Image: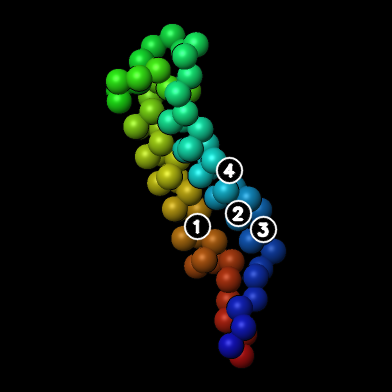
Amino acid sequence: MAKLKRKGYTILLILTAALVLAAISTVIPQSSAKETCKLGYKAHCSFTPISTLLCLALAGIVCMIRKKFFTQLHK
């Protein structure tokens, strides 16, 4: 059986990738940051552990929505 992808699948795939990249960018060290993050270093985002987990959770939710509502089996 092949899987058919409905309209909007690609947009949600790009959104998932963007959220994962945003999560990765939050943990990048940045010496010019004004505040240290909760992990103890100056990161790109001062809310590093929280924002990273939030971005990854949103990416997971979008991925589940994409799989459940935008993919169907074709016989």
Residue toward you, 63 or 49: 49
- The reply to whether residue 45 is visible in this rendering is no
For mark 2, give the secondary structure: helix
Real-space CA distance between mark 3 and mark 2, rounded to the nearest whole angstrom: 5 Å
At horizontal 30% and vertical 20% (from top left) the residue drawn is: 40
Residue 63 placement, left or right of 75: left
Q: Which residue matches tag 1?
A: 63
**Sequence-first tag of 3 and 1:** 3
Real-space CA distance between mark 1 and mark 2, rounded to the nearest whole angstrom: 7 Å
Q: Which residue matches tag 4?
A: 18
Asked whether the beta carbons under mark 3 and mark 1 sit within 8 Å of each other, the answer is no
At horizontal 40% and vertical 17% (from top left) the residue drawn is: 42
Dot 1 amino acid type: Cys
For mark 4, give the secondary structure: helix
Asked whether the beta carbons under mark 3 and mark 2 sit within 8 Å of each other, the answer is yes
Q: Nearer the viewer, mark 4 or mark 3?
A: 4
Disc number placed over residue 27 in the picture, else none:
none
Dot 4 amino acid type: Ala
Real-space CA distance between mark 3 and mark 1, rounded to the nearest whole angstrom: 11 Å
Residue 24 placement, left or right of 49: right
Disc number placed over residue 10 in the picture, else none:
3
Dot 2 amino acid type: Leu
Q: Which residue matches tag 2?
A: 12
For the N terminus, which image quadrant?
A: bottom right
Badge 2: residue crowd in 10 Å (few <14, some 14–19, many ≥20): some
Residue 24 locus on image (x, y percent) = 48, 37
